[in-house]
Image (tube, rainbow, N blue to C red):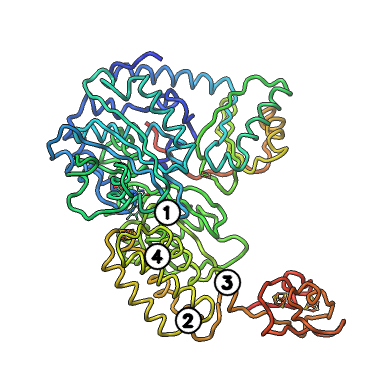
Amino acid sequence: MATQLRIATRNSGFIDPESVESYIAVGGYQALGKCLSKMKPADVIELMKNSGLRGRGGAGFPTGVKWGFAAKYESDIKHVVCNADEGDPGAFMDRAVLEGDPHSVLEAMAIGAYAIGGNKGTIYIRAEYPLAIARLKMAIEQAKEMGVLGDNIMGTDFCFDLELKYGAGAFVCGEETALINSMEGNRGEPYTKPPFPAEAGYWNKPTIVNNVETLANIPAIIMKGADWFNKIGTETSKGTKVFCICGKIANVGLIEVPMGTTLKEVIYDIGGGIPGGKEFKAVQTGGPSGGALTYKDLDAPIDYENLVARQSMMGSGGMIVMDEEDCMVSVAKFFLDFTMDETCGKCTPCRIGSKRIYELLDKITIGQGTEEDLEKLRSLSVNIKDTALCGLGQTMPNPVLSTMRVFEDEYRAHVIDKKCPAGVCAELLEYTVVDQKCVGCTLCAKVCPVNCISGKPKEVHVIDQAACIKCGACLDKCKFDAIIKQ
Amino acid sequence: MTKINSLADLQEKAEKLQAAKTKTMNEKVIVRVSLATCSIASGGKELMAAMKEECAAQGIANVVFKQVGCQTYCYAEPTVEITLPGREPVTFGYVKGDKAKELVQKYIKSGELVEGVISTNYERVVF
Ligand SMILES: Cc1cc2nc3c(=O)[nH]c(=O)nc-3n(C[C@H](O)[C@H](O)[C@H](O)COP(=O)(O)O)c2cc1C
Ligand code: SF4
Ligand code: SF4
Ligand code: SF4
Ligand code: FES
């Protein structure tokens, strides 16, 4: 039985998030105290580097190294930004941490500021998270009153000021340069790096941007040491990762496991497997930037490198589980629909490309796709990856490429046989009566909205395929399982 | 709130708070109700109110209610963790309708388990 290990989520569900005392009672703010009174900023950075912690927001960049860059630049003001934008469909772990343990994030931000020689912090959070916002505000106020944030923290001359900025909930605003633009009151559009934020970020000052989950790990690392953290996880990926498992899984929810736990352990041991006796088909990791993993990948230990080697990615930790009743073309279409809505429109490959990919996928799901369209899809996807400006556009074709690679048969069934093997794409389905089972009860004919079912009472009924609008009403009504859709 | 002026101050405060917590744990029933966005949406607040009401109705006074964040069991929300004095915490899921009252009448009153226990399989870092 795989066990979870809770580091980033250690306090969520255990302490009262609205009480600073509750946090202090479990050792809260002692990591900050330890840094301020016993460590030099350079020691803190060294410790972070040695721990091997990598960013949990998606890119997996080593946190200590990022802090080291920002520390190198001379500046009167330096910023620490907490990225609480969390826009991936199916991901809500950052929200859970902020709502359940806001002080750990504040404490980590103060530690980061101390390490880089900064004194200003901003939490960029989407306005759709009102409870997290309320609890953060409360936490900031209480921590200041307590003297663990604000001026002269714990009697030292370190001061750290913190404010909240609200995002309108655009996926692209989670990308760090777009986030900085948005914080400055501009359109949330990405810009090209360099300069990296560590050199010139928010208001052109050295800035570190860290994800909520990354930050939540930090006080634990300071308290328990780099070696302790280093021993958890795999060769390249240290510590734990929080995942939100959703979709066709019995135990939908939040989990935190050591890096290197296998997908099988996550889905079956912890997630409780696929409900309703259905067959596992795939799991999408990395959200709209990631890819589909199949039964072939179930034994793979999850870490950054392993997922990339299998042509998916870690992303922020959303895991969408799919069973035999999910159509992979529709899944790809779902993600493209999302990116088509969320593209900022700054560059053409992403703005127009997402629309064209979506249209092609749509054409395939309504049975009008051709083999040529599959080729178009592939080359368009590859081109967009190469030419888009930011991570959103560069990864947007991944769900398409990945499903096309792993489920090629399913794409071909759609364009050649005009069938949807999973039985999802309505236009490709046929409702038929099984002669042997039909008792001629006439119920189906009565509910059919277009009167396309004919037959005398007590005789086998027949569906006129040309007139059928595939509403499924007859299937639901038949008590004798005499109607099948395929 | 008295200000914390040094690391020693903070440690002293933490020890005091911990001691108070241990004392409460030894004497009282601790009820932690998950009140994060998803828990509230599925009825966490109602569950807390119903349990409080039932405790009052039964004349049970040694219960401390605490709101906490996500208890990680979306599928079984609303959830509540109950710690009877001197016992391991037990988490109950699907606490809707009369279930809240039943928890008070059976588990809190006499330690009798009711359905919906969620088995936990995690370790948690503490320091
Ligand atoms: C389109 C896009 C969306 C992103 N959204 C988020 C997000 O919601 N939260 C987040 O922390 N990082 C997000 N990132 C990654 C950030 O750009 C950045 O790498 C991260 O916040 C750095 O923090 P970390 O090193 O702690 O992971 C996104 C990146 C891209 C390209
Ligand atoms: S890739 Fe897309 S989201 Fe990124 S800058 Fe270009 S248009 Fe905007
Ligand atoms: S409802 Fe079923 S059994 Fe009745 S006539 Fe229609 S197909 Fe036959
Ligand atoms: S699917 Fe709808 S339209 Fe088609 S035969 Fe059944 S009831 Fe009639
Ligand atoms: S967010 Fe649903 S249980 Fe945590």
Identified by mark 3, the residue type is Val
How busy is the neighbourhood of tag 4: few (under 14 within 10 Å), some, or many (20 plus)? many
* Earlier sequence position, callout 4 versus callout 1: 1
Which residue, given by chain and number where applicable, does mark 2 sit on?
A: A369
Which residue, given by chain and number where applicable, does mark 4 sit on?
A: A291
CA gap, disc 4 and disc 1: 13 Å
Which of A165/A378 is in front? A165
Q: Quadrant of residue B56?
A: top right
Which residue, given by chain and number where applicable, does mark 1 sit on?
A: A88
CA gap, disc 3 and disc 1: 24 Å
Residues indicated by labels 3 and 1 sit on the same polypeptide chain: yes
Residue drawn at point x = 20 percent, y = 38 percent = A45
* Earlier sequence position, callout 3 versus callout 1: 1
Q: Position of residue A332 (x, y in %)?
A: 45, 68
Residues at marks 2 and 1 touching, judged by CB atoms closer than 8 Å: no
A481 left or right of A387 in image: right
Residues indicated by labels 2 and 3 sit on the same polypeptide chain: yes
Q: Chain of mark 2?
A: A
Mark 2 or 1, closer to the camera:
2
Residue A149 is labelled as none
Identified by mark 2, the residue type is Gly
How busy is the neighbourhood of tag 3: few (under 14 within 10 Å), some, or many (20 plus)? some
Q: Quadrant of residue A53?
A: top left
Mark 4 or 1, closer to the camera:
1
Which residue, given by chain and number where applicable, does mark 3 sit on?
A: A424
Q: Position of residue A55 (x, y in %)?
A: 30, 48
How busy is the neighbourhood of tag 2: few (under 14 within 10 Å), some, or many (20 plus)? many
Disc 4 is placed on an element classified as strand
Identified by mark 1, the residue type is Asp
CA gap, disc 2 and disc 4: 22 Å
